[in-house]
Image (tube, grey):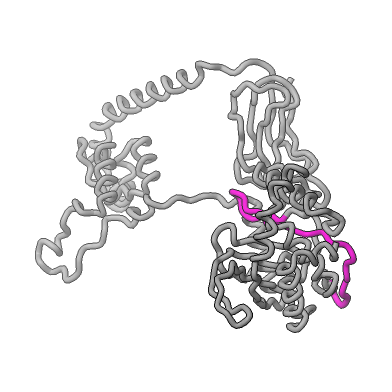
Amino acid sequence: MAVEIHVPELGESVADATVGKWLKSEGDAVKSGDPLVELETDKINFEVEAEQDGVLESIASKEGDTVNVGDVIGTIGEGEAGGDQPEQDSGEEAEDSEDEQAQAEQSEPEADAETETEVAGDEETNGHREMEDGAGRASPSVRKLAEEYDIQLAEVSGSGSGGRITRDDVERLIREQDQGGASAPETSEQRDGKAEKPAAPASQNGRADLEERVRMSRRRLTIAQRLVESQQTAAMLTTFNEVDMSAVMELRKRRKDAFQERTGARLGFMSFFAKAAIGALKAFPKVNAELQENELVLKKYYDLGVAVSTDEGLVVPVLRDADRKSFAGIEQGIADLATKARDGKLGLEDLRGGTFTITNGGIFGSLLSTPILTMPQVAILGMHKIQERPMVVDGEIQVRPMMYVALSYDHRVIDGSEAVGFLVRIKELIEDPESLLLEG
C-alpha cells in the first residue's frame, strides 16, 4: 500500500517552504528514516525522511515548487527498485530512435510527392508554412535538438532527400554558433559587395552557451528581500571609529593557551567585543531597542545576533542572555552556533529574536564597511581587519595594530551623538580590557 509523503509542520509562523532538492529519484529503494527531500524555508533547511521501507513511487512537487504544510509531495510504495530499468529504457529509446529513422526514410518519397502536390495546388497553405518554419522538413528528434539549442529550422538548409533537415545539418549549425558564426554562409549582399557592416552572428546564442542559470535558494531570496526592506524602512546612517588592539592582543597571547586548557574554548576577539558591546548597550539603552509604530521598546536583556557566513548566504543566529555568560560561555556559544549554521542544523529558535548584532568582516579581509541593519533591530556593530599602522602615541610615532569599527544605526531612534558615544565606549573598553571585568 502506497504511503503519502506530506510536508511536516515547519515551525511557528512558517506556513510554506520551497522544494530544494530531492535526495532520491523515482524508483529508488528507500528505508525508514532515509532523507528523501530537502525543504527550504525563510530561516532554515531541513530534510523530510521516509516513514517506511519501500520504493519512491512518485514525486508530486519538483525542485523549486512552493509547498504548504500538509501538502502531498510524493508517495512511497511497496516493492523493490528495478535495477535493470535504466538499461531497458535506454534500449527502448534506441529502438524508438531506429524505428523513427526508418519511418522517416520510408516516408521521404511520400513527403516529397506531398510537398510537390501542395506547392502546385496552393502555395499559401501547408507547404508554404513548412518552408517558413522548417518544422515539416525535420523528424521529431531533430526538432527537439533544434529547440534545445534555439535553432530556427527555417534557417537550416536540409541536406537530406527533398531538402529534409537531418541531425547532421542541425549539429553543424550548432558548431558554427559556438565558433561565433565564423563559418556562417555568405549572404547575397556580401557577395555583391553591398554590405557596409560586418555580418551579425548567425545566432545570439554564443554567449548564452557560456552562461549558467542557478535557482536562488529560499533563504537567499529572503535575505535579499529583508536587506531591501531594511534600506527602504530605516533612516540608516553609519559612524566610524578606530580601536588600538594592542592590549587585547597582548592579553590574548598570554592567556589563550591556559584559557583553552581550562575551559575547552578558544579565546578569540569576539568575546571581547561582545562584552564591550554589552557594556556600551547598558550605557546607551536606545541602541538596544526596537521601534514599534509610535513606541520605542527598550530591552533590558541582551540577546546578541552573530553574523555567520554559509554557502547559502549570511545567517544571524542569536546568543541568548549574553550578559550573563563568561568569556568562555560566549566563545563556546558562538562556536556552537557557527558550526550548526555551516552544517545546516540551525533551528528556528536559534534565529528568532535578537536585540543587537555584531558582524566581523575582518575575517574575510575587509578593512572598512557599512553593515546593514537586521530589522527590527536599530543598530549593528561591524568589526574589521586588524592592520598595523603608524600612530602618534604620547608625541611619538609607533606602529600599532588598529581596527576600524563601524556602527550602522536607525537615525529615527538614535541620534548621532549617541551613536558616536556608543563607539567611543566600545573603544575605551577594548583598549582597557581589564575594565571588561568590571562591566561583567
Res. 15 in view = no
Above or below residue 313? Residue 49 is: above
Q: In the displayed structure, would residue 122 be above or below residue 413? A: above
Q: Residue at x 26, y 58 (%)?
A: 201
Q: Position of residue 5 (x, y in %)?
A: 73, 32
Which residues make up the magenta segment? Answer: 292-316
Residue 314 among magenta residues:
yes
Quarter of the picture containing the C terminus is: bottom right
Residue ranking furthest to the left: 192
Q: Nearer the viewer, residue 322 or 411?
A: 322
Using the rendered view, name the quadrant where residue 396 is placed. Answer: bottom right
Quick check: can you spot residue 438?
yes
* Position of 419 relative to 38 (above/below): below
Give the side of residue 282 with respect to residue 189, left or right.
right
Q: Is residue 406 magenta?
A: no
Residue 433: x percent and y percent?
A: 75, 64
Q: Is residue 434 above or below residue 81?
A: below
Question: Which one is in front, 136 or 69?
Answer: 69
Residue 429 pos. (x, y %): 76, 69
Residue at x-position 10% and y-position 61%: 191
User: Which quarter of the picture shows residue 253?
Assistant: bottom right
Q: Percent position (x, y) of residue 338?
A: 69, 48
Count of labels shown?
0
Measuring 54% from the left and 67% from the top, which residue is drawn there? 388
**Which quadrant, please, contains the N terminus?**
top right
